[in-house]
Image (cartoon, rainbow, N blue to C red):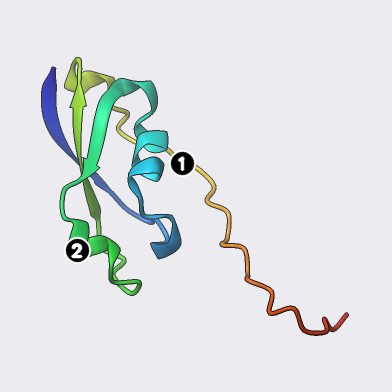
Amino acid sequence: SDGVLVGTKGIPAHARSVETAQTILGSSSARVEIAKPGALADPDDDRELFIAAWCAHPNLIPDEKIMAVPEPQEEHDGGPHST
């Protein structure tokens, strides 16, 4: 298998993870990892997130994939809720 570097854009800070990367690349990659883990730590860093992916062939990686990312669930403090 070949190792390739894939740049992703527009992933919200709360969704930057290996799991999201694997979802984006789907079955085209056998293994993925975040190329620069420090990019996960900065919530204001909206630059490209680079993913190292190992795949059977680089042509299997999609050029573009549009997907919806759900907002993070807010933690409830157990107090009264306004309606």
Q: Residue at x 22, y 20 (%)?
A: 59
Q: What number of labels is visible?
A: 2
Query: Does residue 10 lie above or below 58 as drawn?
Result: below
Residue type of the residue flagged with mark 2: Gly
Residue indicated by mark 1: 66
Q: Residue at x 39, y 64 (%)?
A: 13
Kind of element beneath mark 2: helix
Counting residues from the start of the chain, the first of labels 1 and 2 encountered is 2
Q: Which mark is residue 40?
A: none
Quadrant assignment, res 80: bottom right
Is residue 23 rendered to the left or right of residue 51? right
Query: Does residue 72 lie above or below 26 as drawn?
Result: below
Kind of element beneath mark 1: loop
Closer to the eye: label 1 or 2 = 2
> Percent from the top left, x then y, of residue 17?
35, 50
Residue at mark 1 to residue at mark 2: CA–CA distance: 25 Å
Crowd band around label 1 with a 10 angstrom C-alpha radius: few (<14), some (14–19), many (20+): few
Which sits in the foreground, 65 or 55?
55
Q: Residue at x 39, y 42 (%)?
A: 19
Is residue 43 rendered to the left or right of residue 71? left
Is residue 7 rendered to the left or right of residue 81? left
Quadrant assignment, res 64: top left
Q: Residue at x 88, y 80 (%)?
A: 83
Query: Does residue 36 lie above or below 33 as drawn?
Result: below
> Percent from the top left, x then y, of residue 50?
21, 49
Crowd band around label 2 with a 10 angstrom C-alpha radius: few (<14), some (14–19), many (20+): few
Residue indicated by mark 2: 38
> Percent from the top left, x then y, of residue 36?
16, 55
Q: Quadrant of the N terminus?
A: top left
Residue type of the residue flagged with mark 1: Ile
> Percent from the top left, x then y, of residue 76?
69, 74
